[in-house]
Amino acid sequence: MILAATKICLQKQEREGEEVGETFGEREAILKETLKVLERQEKFLNGFDRGEAVEVAPGHRIRKAR
């Protein structure tokens, strides 16, 4: 939930900056990249918890033991 709220806020700041003609700052760019990593991790953990086979490396998948 926190990730989603942060992403929405960041997208809003980016849109507002584009309207005014401001460039996206380095701090915001780092935050955007960090959010991408956290979203991938969240997707991985959600799939793993559901018992789906998740990719841990190219061509290698694991599944949570039941």
Image: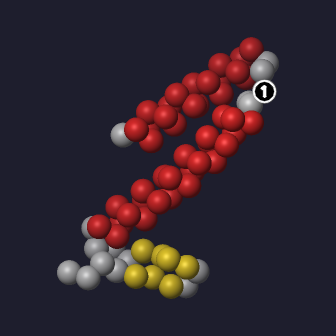
Query: Vertically, is 42 above or below 66?
Result: above
Count of marks placed on residues: 1
| Figure quadrant of the C terminus | bottom left
Outermost residue to the bottom: 60
Residue 9 x/y as whole percent:
52, 28
Residue 52 x/y as whole percent:
33, 74
Location of residue 37 by image quarter:
bottom right
Query: Vertically, is 50 above or below 22?
Result: below
Outermost residue to the top: 20
Residue 20 x/y as whole percent:
74, 14
Query: Within 10 Å of the Cα at label 1, are there few (<14), some (14-19), or many (20+) other Cα atoms?
Result: few
Seen at 26% across and 82% down, the residue is 65
Residue 5 x/y as whole percent:
44, 33
- Left or right: 51 as drawn, with respect to 2: left
- Left or right: 57 as drawn, with respect to 18: left
Amino acid carrying mark 1 in the image: Thr
Seen at 36% across and 40% down, the residue is 1
Seen at 78% across and 21% down, the residue is 22
Seen at 50% across and 58% down, the residue is 40
Tag 1 secondary structure: loop
Location of residue 28 by image quarter:
top right
Outermost residue to the front: 27
Look at the image and name its color scheme.
secondary structure
Q: Which residue in the structure is indicated by mark 1?
A: 23
| Front position in the image: 25 or 44 | 25
